[in-house]
């Protein structure tokens, strides 16, 4: 059968994406000049990015970018970004004992960054072991991947913006693309400007906490330096979870932890709603069924977990302290962990891997839900769960009244039956891949004595990577690491992170024969 996908055009545009990623490396390059660390690493990396991008661009055939080519471009661009993104880790690790000097570890860290997963194999995370510039590159990969690499390219490159709608359809999280302006490039710019605005606001407020001693008796966040404020701004809004601090947000005072919570909630909200707010259209926001469901799920899970923790579900730990009988700490730990894990951020203020079964089950349930469509959050997404639940209710209704025609509605809108089938199909694929991933990870990990996984640990590893969440249970807790997994498991989890960020279909379909044949 003849091949009909113009793969050369997709490869060429992937080269364009990689070439422009070199511009983003200006941020770690400037950081390297400020701290006098790894400047050569980032100069060399910029050059390599440009050379690889230019070489791939030579495949250009000036052909049309149809739906198959757009789908292939999205899959290749994200995979290519992860591969080239590992280059600074490899160069910085040359001649050292850094875990990132191994190509598999470097690829894992890079894919985890761009997909905003937050799972790490870095080992000792500190500016004493790794340069400030390398750690800021690690943070920046999450920020670039949060709103979407392709969405950014559509916003700035006319040659990609021509086919922007079908590209964003494949990359944007959720069952459908929400167009905010007549031109798709303008929609992409709107989304990125809102994203940038919240990031700058986060950095400003965190820096203000640090300098609060100028007004108060003491600083509310003495350890939240400008570097830390920028670093965490680059990973909070994309729901990434990477931190230059080994103890994550637990390294900072309660004031910082409380302030991070609303920004994680914002990051899990459909960013299109903020565009409506800027245009004073509060009716659309308040009537949005997914937004109401999202806030309701957050509030309910936070209250349940706070009650469980207050009753004594968490032991007194070095990180997190005692929650039993301590209302403020129980409320803060519950709000933070639910806000972090439901939105797939992956930050932590306590080692929930050591909590009792009741608290862990609440957390596991939150991991399954996910954020909103059109947000930077991972998981299945609130809107899909709403449609699945309504479809299930309709089946129950039609079982007793088979002649009744009952459309599925979200708010005042009727959901197209094709969209309903797509949501159910995606959810089933997600759950099948999740279960299969848990089995593969468990079997492969059993080949080594370096890591012992229980069934719930293996399930959390699969869920944490395909859902782009980051931490899991057992040795994969919020202060744990994926370092001890066999390289085969790490490569499989790289695949899960890639597929999870692109919501499975754009990745799996390129491995089918039907995609490549007439």
Image (cartoon, grey):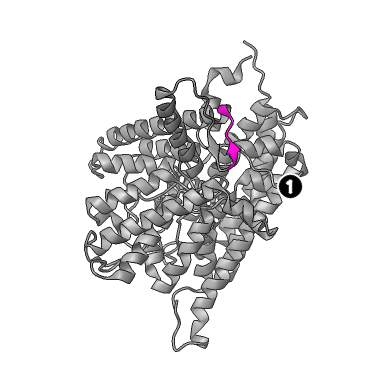
- Look at the image and give the residue range highlighted in magenta: 412-417
Residue at figure coordinates x 53%, y 63% from the top left:
233
Query: Is residue 113 placed above or below 421 in the rendered structure?
Result: below
Looking at the picture, how far across and down is residue 385, in whole percent? 45, 39
Residue at figure coordinates x 52%, y 81% from the top left:
211
Residue 5 appears in the rendering: yes
The residue identified by callout 1 is 181
Quadrant location of the C terminus in the rendered image: top right
Q: Nearer the viewer, residue 281 or 230?
A: 281
Looking at the picture, how far across and down is residue 38, in whole percent? 54, 61
User: Which residue is situated farthest in the top direction here?
Assistant: 1
Residue at figure coordinates x 31%, y 57% from the top left:
305
Query: In the figure, is residue 379 to the left or right of 458?
Result: right
Quadrant location of the N terminus in the rendered image: top right
Query: In the figure, is residue 88 to the left or right of 183?
Result: left
Residue 518 lies in the magenta-colored region: no
Looking at the picture, how far across and down is residue 166, in whole percent? 67, 34
Residue at figure coordinates x 28%, y 43% from the top left:
457
């Amino acid at each position: 059968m003849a091949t009909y996908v113009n793969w050369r055009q997709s490869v060429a545009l992937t080269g364009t994406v990689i070439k422009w990623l070199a511009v983003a490396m200006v941020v770690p390059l400037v950081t390297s000049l400020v701290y006098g660390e790894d400047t050569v690493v980032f100069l060399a990396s910029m050059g390599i990015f440009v050379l690889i991008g230019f070489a791939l661009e030579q495949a250009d055939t000036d052909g049309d970018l149809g739906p198959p080519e757009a789908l292939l471009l999205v899959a290749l661009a994200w995979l290519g970004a992860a591969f080239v993104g590992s280059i600074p880790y490899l160069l910085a690790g040359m001649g050292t004992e850094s875990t990132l000097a191994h190509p598999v570890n470097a690829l894992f860290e890079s894919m985890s960054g761009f997909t905003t997963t937050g799972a790490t194999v870095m080992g000792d995370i500190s500016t004493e072991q790794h340069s400030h510039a390398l750690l800021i590159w690690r943070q920046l990969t999450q920020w670039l991947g949060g709103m979407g690499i392709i969405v950014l390219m559509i916003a700035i490159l006319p040659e990609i913006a021509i086919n922007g709608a079908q590209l964003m359809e494949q990359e944007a999280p959720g069952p459908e693309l929400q167009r905010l302006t007549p031109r798709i490039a303008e929609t992409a710019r709107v989304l990125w400007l809102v994203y940038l605005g919240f990031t700058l606001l986060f950095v400003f407020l965190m820096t203000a906490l640090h300098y609060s001693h100028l007004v108060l008796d003491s600083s509310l966040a003495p350890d939240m330096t400008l570097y830390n404020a920028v670093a965490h701004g680059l990973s909070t809004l994309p729901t990434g979870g990477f931190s230059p601090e080994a103890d994550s947000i637990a390294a900072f005072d309660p004031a910082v932890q409380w302030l991070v919570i609303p920004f994680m909630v914002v990051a899990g909200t459909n960013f299109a709603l903020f565009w409506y707010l800027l245009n004073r259209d509060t009716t659309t926001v308040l009537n949005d069924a997914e937004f109401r469901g999202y806030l309701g799920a957050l509030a309910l899970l936070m209250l349940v977990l706070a009650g469980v923790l207050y009753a004594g579900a968490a032991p007194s730990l070095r990180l997190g302290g005692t929650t039993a009988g301590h209302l403020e700490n129980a409320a803060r730990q519950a709000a933070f962990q639910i806000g972090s894990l439901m939105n797939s951020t992956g930050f932590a203020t306590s080692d929930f891997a050591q909590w009792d079964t009741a608290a862990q089950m609440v957390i596991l349930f939150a991991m399954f839900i996910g954020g909103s469509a059109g947000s930077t959050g991972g998981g299945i997404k609130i809107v899909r769960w709403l449609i699945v639940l309504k479809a299930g209710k309709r089946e129950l209704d039609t079982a007793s009244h088979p002649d009744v025609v009952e459309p599925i509605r979200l708010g005042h809108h009727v959901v197209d039956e094709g969209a309903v089938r797509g949501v159910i199909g995606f959810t089933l694929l997600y759950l099948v891949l999740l279960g299969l991933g848990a089995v593969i990870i468990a079997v492969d990990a059993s080949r080594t004595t370096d890591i012992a996984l229980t069934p719930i640990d293996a399930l959390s590893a699969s869920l944490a990577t395909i859902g782009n969440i980051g931490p899991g249970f057992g040795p994969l807790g919020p202060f744990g690491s994926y370092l001890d997994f066999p390289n085969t498991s790490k490569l499989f989890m790289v695949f899960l992170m890639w597929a999870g960020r692109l919501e499975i279909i754009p990745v799996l379909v390129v491995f089918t024969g039907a995609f490549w044949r007439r």
